[in-house]
């Protein structure tokens, strides 16, 4: 990767993978079950309630596929998976795909109105739901015209009690919302005969949906094929991270995220590794508990989570954990955060960037070659292009819009032609991120396209200012936006969250930034908050901060 390719599309060799498996007929679930047929007795997944071997995982999934068919849920019908990270989640996801039904992974933190929108938008025929989330589902069903006829309740013992009746009463309430069948998922599965053969799907058949985070506007149903997860495993799970059969994987990012789906299902199941799932929120203490008790060797997190962990008084000792590899995505990892984690545990954080549309990471640092402060190199198998406002390639050192081409690109956005045409441009996907390509071939994040600031006619990256601010010993988190001054010109404003017990003044922080960045980049205004507004993925919602200044 020469630093002299300043005006060329950045391409890297494509790994061969086991392409023989990607013929005209390909079912991703069947692919997973076939490659693990010799590991029937090995533990595939462990959650807070139980565990499944690879043999049991395949059997349960095939039972689910048969049950869906018997209930009249047909090929390419949608089944919503609105479930905490438990063993029933991969059973539901792979079982649906095995039978040609399209699972729709849903954020468990959604409010009822958001869920109602997705129920109506996807026209889901079935829902697999955690008992703990049943009240939200019931409320959502009452708010929309829906097509749901079957609800599978995972762990009904977790249905919350509010004095309005027991779990059975709540399940009856769903029937009053037009749902024909509401059953205990475990009992229902035991009554099914495993489906003998997978649906006759191809690599290009609709496989599953993921909804975008919806930080602005309505969330978009992103349609992925059966072949897409195969390529993310080949390119990143095997090709870059080198995850192997002996690994135990644990992801703070939940399965309903593209990042979490790869971390805790696609990557480990593609090599016969084991997975630790956690139903509760990934607080530092909850993560530490699994680190110590379950001894994962690979951990997947996000910058916000790492910041909270390193600030925790309960941070485990190096001798208490078994991590060999740590991955980060969601937002660019500040160099200081990565360096402090490595100093603490002797393990690098491999920072990368991916998206719902590309399914997983396409630009990443590499184990053993981590360049903190950058997002590393293109993942082999993907082609990257940085373009200016005129659509032409920009030279090294200049900010450009990032475009990606690769086999894992989503097919389209469901019922959103305009946005599909804007994002999926032939072989290219417009990421919405801005980057700078460095002379050594690495890429440095410069913010979202709609987050970039132009101050005194010069682009300013909010992330650059944020990354500088969080180096201050008093600051836990920071978010930067542009606000108009009295003349209507853009000026930099910072929102900061201080660490517990820490103090700092605006003047002190402004001087701190001035010492480290060009003068025009320092924040003219600083506002202190108890917490920053974020999406469920932990991404800062700068649009909410901008709205507060409108």
Image (cartoon, rainbow, N blue to C red):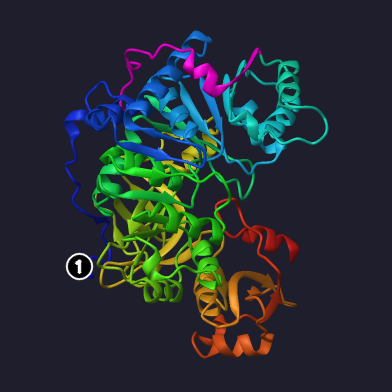
User: In the depicted view, which residue is nearer to us: 431 or 484?
Assistant: 431
User: In the depicted view, which residue is nearer to us: 264 or 212?
Assistant: 264
Q: Is residue 377 visible?
A: yes
Q: 436 above or below 137?
A: below
Q: Quadrant of the N terminus?
A: bottom left
Quadrant for residue 322, please give it: bottom left
Highlighted magenta segment, given as a residue range = 180-204
Percent x, y of residue 401: 43, 58
User: In the depicted view, which residue is nearer to us: 60 or 487?
Assistant: 60
The answer to whether residue 90 is left or right of residue 129 is left
The answer to whether residue 376 is left or right of residue 460 is left
Percent x, y of residue 266: 35, 40
The answer to whether residue 505 is left or right of residue 184 is right
Percent x, y of residue 257: 49, 44
User: In the depicted view, which residue is nearer to us: 523 or 262?
Assistant: 262
Q: Is residue 197 magenta?
A: yes
Secondary structure of the residue carrying numbered label 1: loop
Q: 279 above or below 127?
A: below
Q: 307 above or below 264?
A: below
Q: Quadrant of the C terminus?
A: bottom right
Percent x, y of residue 165: 80, 27
Quadrant for residue 284, please give it: bottom right
- To which residue does mark 1 refer? 2
User: How busy is the neighbourhood of tag 1: few (under 14 within 10 Å), some, or many (20 plus)?
Assistant: few
Q: Is residue 506 magenta?
A: no
The residue sitting at 41% across, 55% down in the picture is 300
The residue sitting at 42% across, 71% down in the picture is 341
Q: Is residue 358 visible?
A: no
């Amino acid at each position: 990767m020469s630093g002299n390719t300043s005006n060329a599309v950045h391409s890297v060799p494509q790994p061969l993978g086991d392409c023989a498996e990607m013929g005209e007929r390909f079912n991703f679930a069947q692919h997973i079950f076939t490659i693990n047929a010799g590991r029937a007795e090995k533990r595939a997944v462990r959650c807070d309630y139980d565990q499944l071997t690879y043999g049991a995982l395949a059997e349960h999934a095939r039972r689910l596929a048969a049950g869906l068919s018997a209930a009249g849920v047909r090929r390419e019908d949608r089944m919503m998976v609105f479930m905490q990270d438990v063993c029933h989640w991969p059973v539901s996801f792979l079982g649906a795909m095995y039978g040609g039904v399209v699972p729709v992974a849903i954020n468990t933190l959604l409010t009822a109105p958001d869920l109602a929108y997705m129920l109506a938008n996807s026209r889901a025929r079935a829902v697999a739901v955690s008992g703990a989330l049943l009240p939200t589902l019931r409320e959502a069903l009452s708010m929309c015209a829906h097509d749901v006829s079957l609800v599978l309740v995972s762990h009904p013992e977790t249905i919350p009690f509010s004095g309005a009746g027991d779990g059975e009463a709540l399940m009856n309430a769903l029937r009053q919302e037009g749902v024909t069948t509401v059953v205990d998922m475990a009992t229902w599965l035991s009554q099914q005969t495993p489906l003998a053969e997978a649906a006759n799907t191809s690599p290009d058949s609709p496989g599953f949906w993921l909804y975008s985070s919806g930080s602005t506007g309505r969330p978009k149903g992103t349609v992925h094929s059966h072949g897409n997860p195969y390529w993310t495993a080949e390119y990143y799970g095997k090709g870059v991270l080198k995850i192997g059969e002996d690994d135990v994987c644990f992801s703070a990012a939940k399965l309903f995220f593209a990042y979490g789906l790869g971390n805790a299902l696609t990557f480990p199941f593609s090599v016969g590794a084991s997975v630790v799932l956690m139903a509760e929120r990934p607080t530092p203490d909850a993560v530490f508990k699994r680190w110590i008790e379950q001894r994962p060797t690979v951990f997947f997190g996000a910058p916000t989570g790492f910041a909270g962990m390193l600030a925790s008084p309960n941070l485990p000792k190096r001798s208490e954990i078994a991590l060999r590899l740590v991955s980060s995505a969601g937002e660019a990892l500040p160099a200081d955060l990565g360096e402090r984690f490595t100093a603490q545990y002797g393990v690098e954080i491999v920072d990368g960037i991916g998206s719902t549309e590309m399914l997983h990471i396409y630009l990443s640092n590499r184990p053993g070659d981590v360049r903190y402060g950058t997002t590393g190199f293109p993942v082999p198998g993907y082609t990257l292009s940085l373009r200016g406002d005129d659509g032409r390639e920009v030279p090294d050192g200049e900010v450009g819009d990032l475009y990606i081409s690769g086999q894992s690109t989503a097919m389209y956005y469901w019922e959103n032609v305009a946005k599909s045409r804007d994002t999926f441009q032939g072989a290219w996907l417009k990421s919405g991120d801005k980057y700078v390509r460095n002379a050594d071939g690495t890429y440095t994040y410069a913010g979202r396209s709609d987050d970039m600031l132009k101050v005194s006619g010069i682009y300013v990256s909010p992330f650059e200012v944020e990354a500088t601010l969080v180096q201050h010993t008093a600051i836990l988190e920071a978010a930067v936006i542009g606000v108009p001054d009295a003349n209507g010109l853009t000026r930099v404003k910072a929102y900061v969250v201080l660490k517990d017990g820490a103090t700092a003044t605006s003047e002190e922080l402004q001087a701190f930034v001035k010492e480290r960045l060009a003068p025009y980049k320092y924040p003219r205004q600083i506002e202190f908050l108890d917490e920053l507004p974020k999406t469920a993925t932990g991404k800062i919602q700068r649009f909410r901060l901008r709205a507060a200044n409108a």
